[in-house]
Image (spheres, coloured by chain):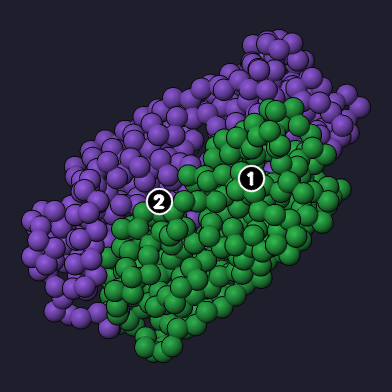
Chain colours: A purple, B green
Amino acid sequence: MAERPSKGARLKDVAERADVSIKTVSNVVRGQVRVAEPTRQRVLRAIAELDYRPHASARHLRTGRSGVIALAVPELVQPYFAELATAVIGAAAEHGVSVLIEDTGGDPAAELRAACGLSDPLIDGVLLSPRLLDQSALARRERRVPLVLLGERDYEVPADHVLIDNVAAAREATAHLLELGRRRVAAIGFQTNPAHATSQQRARGYHEALHAAGVPYDPELTPAVPDFQRMDGAAAMRGLLALPEPPDAVFCFSDLLASGALRAAYDHGLEVPRDLAIVGFDGIEETQFSVPSLSTVAPDKPQLAQLAVKALLARIAGDPDAPHTTQHATHRLVRRESSGAR
Amino acid sequence: MAERPSKGARLKDVAERADVSIKTVSNVVRGQVRVAEPTRQRVLRAIAELDYRPHASARHLRTGRSGVIALAVPELVQPYFAELATAVIGAAAEHGVSVLIEDTGGDPAAELRAACGLSDPLIDGVLLSPRLLDQSALARRERRVPLVLLGERDYEVPADHVLIDNVAAAREATAHLLELGRRRVAAIGFQTNPAHATSQQRARGYHEALHAAGVPYDPELTPAVPDFQRMDGAAAMRGLLALPEPPDAVFCFSDLLASGALRAAYDHGLEVPRDLAIVGFDGIEETQFSVPSLSTVAPDKPQLAQLAVKALLARIAGDPDAPHTTQHATHRLVRRESSGAR
């Protein structure tokens, strides 16, 4: 950035050139308020012509805030996180705040680095969806940038926290399959790693629903998976279909697992839902379009995003030592063709 | 960030506490070199205990570089861009560089802001996949942060540029359908907006393949779509199936369009590929798992990412006024069930 001129144009110069008010230029630059398209184009042209660049760090020093937050998620290639990121961008834009996204790969060190603000002095605060980062590491992260956790951790985390009730959601999905009269209800998504809170909680909901229906738990029907990807779902389903007594229904802990399971059932010559009913989890867009369409537990992503952004902005503006809050977003079971809905 | 202590721990203090070399701490912090897991955990613990935070802007001032680049894409909810982002993160990590991601929503103003480095002094350079940003806006962006464009623009852009040959790729996809003996080959992805270069180039490849096969162009078979999403593909397919002479094959300009078209064909009672052969574009993961699996044109995303990251790092380290380069990544046509492969 050595080539950037040090004595650059100012907001005032842009406003004069574009023949608009300083406030209008500011609105265009910050994207906070809608500006009529011809005016916006004129301002953008003036910005380009004058080589105007808002000096973020100067603004940052003056106000103490940059208007930029970070969102760290485990994997953007999981559509759930891409959809959640889009919801967060939308919710932040309503407050005039921009979002930079970090893909941690689910690596605890990357998650800790994100929780510390990515070492970026521009970032006002962080929304973190952790996968494996443990409580003690987070607890030792004291007095860093404002942080809100998005996810399923059920421990006492030293941060504000927005989540859905994963146990209840998994219970409802399993109960739905049992109510169809299925009795060999498998679950794909169990994990051997106890730090994987998402898996632990959905497994608990599955157990509770079986118990409530008086259906005994059969460990053969809950194979452990290495991850929540399509190929993991397909491999687990192939294993289940090779059992002497294969399942007649399966609850998958993610829609990607369900997509893989559906494909494996098709390769096995099964008809879904007649031979095998399937319910996924996450409510991602493709579940509406797959053949057959996939039933799924859909967290309310816009609500999750709005609660998380509001909690973070409150923490940024407020007392860093105020007690931490926990808020729940809603979810709903969407019944589609894969579990018998038309 | 007012709460951060001004006189913080230094690298040296962390190294002493963790009983490792300063170089090891640096490796853990920068994530550049693999560090054995127990050692890494010890370093992370020391970092947390001492509240050590690498001061990015100080490092930045000293070296002139932060080791952070930005990637701006139109829409992360399009799996193509999430997969491309993941490939870019992987390619950048090989050079010890971190990536922050910006979702521009395809808005030209957001794309211009990204091309100017997001106003973030931490960002060394930008990879931008523009959707509608026009040449003149980019041309006026002079002497800003180093920039590499990822995408299909065929104009003389004032930046380094990495892309695939979209015309050839679309020609191959269409020719494949014609070689199956189909003669009513539709295309879903035409757009009325001439700034949409992706659409323009794929349309050109479609025309060229028809022409080469001596098949006359029928404008009824190329409905305009508002966007490249699933719902656009489903709506366009429904329109095509309502024609007096519906198509027997369709080339979709994105895999999401193909997913929507496939669902619409299924709702119409058609069997794919017997009644309708389908080829998509992007090579996204779900095409392997859909029922039937989808044929697609797959750009080599890891290669695109590697070429783009290398070009950007060369521009960051090199002469800002050196001539701009254009490099092509490869693509391949993946034949699957939706166009008759087994």
Quadrant position of the N terminus of chain B in the picture: bottom left
Q: Nearer the viewer, residue A232 or A32?
A: A32
Position of B237 with respect to A67 (left or right) is right
- x, y percent for residue B285: 66, 50
User: Is the residue B269 above or below the residue B258 in the image?
Assistant: above
- Residue depicted at 60% across the width and 75% down the height: B328
Q: Secondary structure at mark 2?
A: loop
Q: Residue furthest right?
A: A244
Q: Amino acid at mark 1?
A: Leu
Q: Amino acid at mark 2?
A: Gly
Which chain contains the residue that carries disc 1? B
- x, y percent for residue A76: 52, 51
Q: Earlier in the sequence, mark 1 or mark 2?
A: 2
Which residue lies under the disc numbered 1? B221
Q: Could you give the CA–CA distance between mark 1 and mark 2, rounded to whole angstroms?
A: 29 Å
Q: How many callouts does the rendering have?
A: 2
Write down the quadrant of residue A66 in the picture.
bottom left
Write down the quadrant of residue A170 in the picture.
top right
Q: Secondary structure at mark 1?
A: helix
User: Is the residue B225 above or below the residue A185 in the image?
Assistant: below
Which residue lies under the disc numbered 2? B105
